[in-house]
Image: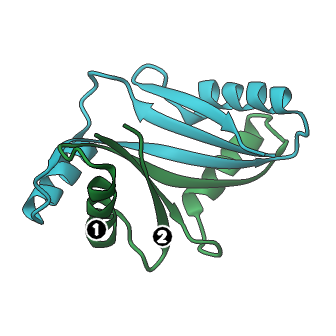
Chain colours: A cyan, B green
Amino acid sequence: MKAIVNVYLKEGVLDPQGKAVHHALDSLGFNGVKDVRVGKQIVLELEANDKETAKTEVQKMCETLLANTVIEDYNVEIVS
Amino acid sequence: MKAIVNVYLKEGVLDPQGKAVHHALDSLGFNGVKDVRVGKQIVLELEANDKETAKTEVQKMCETLLANTVIEDYNVEIVS
């Protein structure tokens, strides 16, 4: 079973990496960009066969390791 | 208009960050994980009003800056 976890900074938290990318895009002539945010996408291959069990397990992983819940939000999607 | 770009290492390219996360999950008692790959998710807020134009523009950004196409693949999704 495959799980996709997206981890991204909460609204209002400054994103220096996003700012740097925005600036670099501007320098390259891509001027139609209003905002850039950079997050992480973690793809997990799991042994679990049950979608619900897999989702619960991955949410636990996010809370303990994958996301810093003080400044980051995450969402979990089980794809197969 | 909002675009979501996922950038991830190509199949067969070693992913040390993914390996480290896998190992850390194991240490924390999450033993049902077979593989972990870590990629980037870049969310762009664009001025363009047309989906096709936006997608072409973002693909150009990926080729020139956002992805290293030697070792990384990407996909672009226009969400609104």
Q: Residues within 10 Å of mark 1 (few under 14, many from 20)?
A: few
Q: Amino acid under label 2?
A: Glu
Chain at tag 1 = B
Question: Which residue appears at 87% of the width and 45% of the height?
Answer: A47
As displayed, is residue A47 above or below residue B28? Answer: below
Closer-to-camera residue (B52/A41) = B52
Taking the image as shown, residue A41 lies to the left or right of residue B22, namely: left
Taking the image as shown, residue A49 lies to the left or right of residue B6, namely: right
Single out the mark in the foreground, 2 or 1.
1
The residue tagged with tag 2: helix, strand or loop? strand
Q: Earlier in the sequence, mark 2 or mark 1?
A: 1
Percent x, y of residue A64: 63, 27
The residue tagged with tag 1: helix, strand or loop? helix
Residue B11 occupies quadrant: bottom right
Percent x, y of residue A72: 43, 27
Question: Which residue appears at 63% of the width and 32% of the height?
Answer: A76
Q: Residues within 10 Å of mark 2 (few under 14, many from 20)?
A: some
Distance, label 2 to label 1, CA atoms, is 15 Å
Percent x, y of residue B80: 36, 37
Question: Which residue appears at 66% of the width and 36% of the height?
Answer: A77
Percent x, y of residue B29: 80, 34
As displayed, is residue B74 above or below residue A78? Answer: below
Q: Amino acid under label 1?
A: Lys
Numbered badge on residue B60: 1
Please identify the quadrant where the N terminus of chain B is shown: top left
- Would you name the residue on which mark 2 appears? B72
Question: Which residue appears at 33% of the width and 50% of the height?
Answer: B51
